[in-house]
Image (cartoon, rainbow, N blue to C red):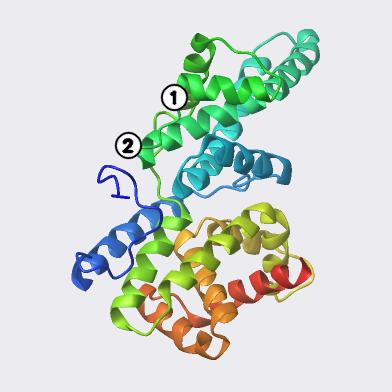
Amino acid sequence: MERDIFASPIEPLFNHEFAMETEILQDWLINLAKKNTLFINQAHSKQGLFKQLNAVETIMYAAEKLKIALEAKYLAIELFDRFLYNHIQDLRDHVLKLPKKKQMKEWQKIQEGVSNQVLLRIVSCCQIASKLTSHYKVVSINRAKRFLRDCGYRYASESLLQSELRVLKTLKFQVTEPTPIVYIETMLEILGCNNTEAEVKTYYYVATKLLDLLYLKYHAFYKILSEVTCSSSIQSTEHKKKFQKVKADQLLLGASIIGGAVFMVQHDKADEMIEELSRITRISQNDIIDFTSVLIQLVEEE
C-alpha cells in the first residue's frame, strides 16, 4: 500500500536520509532553549496545579479516542492546565467584585459550572492542540460531538465553538509553546547524528512511555524530586522559589527522560549518553541524573 504523502508521519524519522544537518539541529535546539528560558522566567507557584491524575487520564483517553497526534496529546495537557488556572483566576476576580453577601453563593454556583464543563474544556484543548500539531488529524466539530455524546454529554456545534474560543481567549491566544516531546525529539535526532550506534528509535518509544508516566504521576514526581534536591528536611521559601523554575524547565525534563529511556534500554550506555546530553544542552550531569533517578524510582514502584 502506498503511503499518503500528505499524512503526518507515524513516528519521527530519526536520522532519515533527508534529515536536517547537525548545525541546523543545534540552531533549532538553541531556539528551543531560548523559549524554555522565557517559560522558566514566567514560572509561578501554581504551575501544574491542574495536572491532576483524573484530568490527565481523561485527556489521554480523549486523545486516544479522538485519534490525535502524540504531540497534540501532551499539548492538550499543558493547555488544559494553563487554561483552568487562568479561568478560575478570572472567575475569582469576578466574584470578588460582588457584594460580600453574594460572594459565597456565587462562588459555589461557579464551582459547579466549572466542574460540569471539565470534559467539554478537555475536548476543546484537544481540538486546539490537533490544529497546532497536525494538518491531517484535526479534530472536527462532528468528531468532538460524537465523542462527547458517547460519554453521555450532548452539545450543539455552537457550544463547542464557543468553548474553543473561551479557551483561546483565556490563554490570550498564546498556545504555541513547545511541549517536552519536542525537546525529546530534537535531542534524540542530535544524539543519533553524533552517535550512529545509538538506538534512538527505541529510546524514543520508551521515552514516550516515561513521559506518559510522568504526567500521570506529576505531583508525586516533583514532590520526591523536591525532597531529593533539598538539603534540609524543612524547605525554605528560597528553595520553593528555585524549585518553581525547575518544574518549568522543559529542556531538563526532556534530557532526563531520554536518560531514563537509555538506562532502561541499554543500562551500560546510560552514563555515556547522559554525558552527551549534558554536553548538548549544557545542563549539569548531576541535575539530569537527579531527575532520571526519581523517574526510574517511579517506574519501579509501578
Q: Is residue 99 above or below residue 142?
A: above
Looking at the rendered structure, the kind of residue marked 2 is: His
Measured as percent of width and height from the top left, residue 25 is found at 25, 66
On the image, which quarter does residue 297 sit in? bottom right
Residue for point 62% across, 16% down: 94
- Of 92 and 268, nearer the camera is 268
As measured in the structure, the alpha-carbon distance from the residue carrying label 2 to the one carrying label 1 is: 12 Å
Quarter of the figure with the C terminus: bottom right
Measured as percent of width and height from the top left, residue 245 is found at 53, 58
On the image, which quarter does residue 87 sit in? top right
Residue for point 80% across, 12% down: 105
Measured as percent of width and height from the top left, residue 133 is found at 37, 42
Q: Is residue 27 above or below residue 112?
A: below
- Of 134 and 94, nearer the camera is 134
Q: Label 2: which residue? A: 135
Label 2: state its secondary structure: loop
Q: Is residue 69 above or below residue 30?
A: above
Residue 227 visible, this angle: no
Label 1: state its secondary structure: loop
Kindly identify which numbered label has been placed on residue 140: 1
Residue for point 54% across, 73% down: 261
Measured as percent of width and height from the top left, residue 301 is found at 78, 69
Could you classify mark 2 by the number of other residues whose Cα lies within 10 Å: few (under 14), some (14-19), or many (20 or more)?
Answer: few
On the image, which quarter does residue 114 sit in? top right
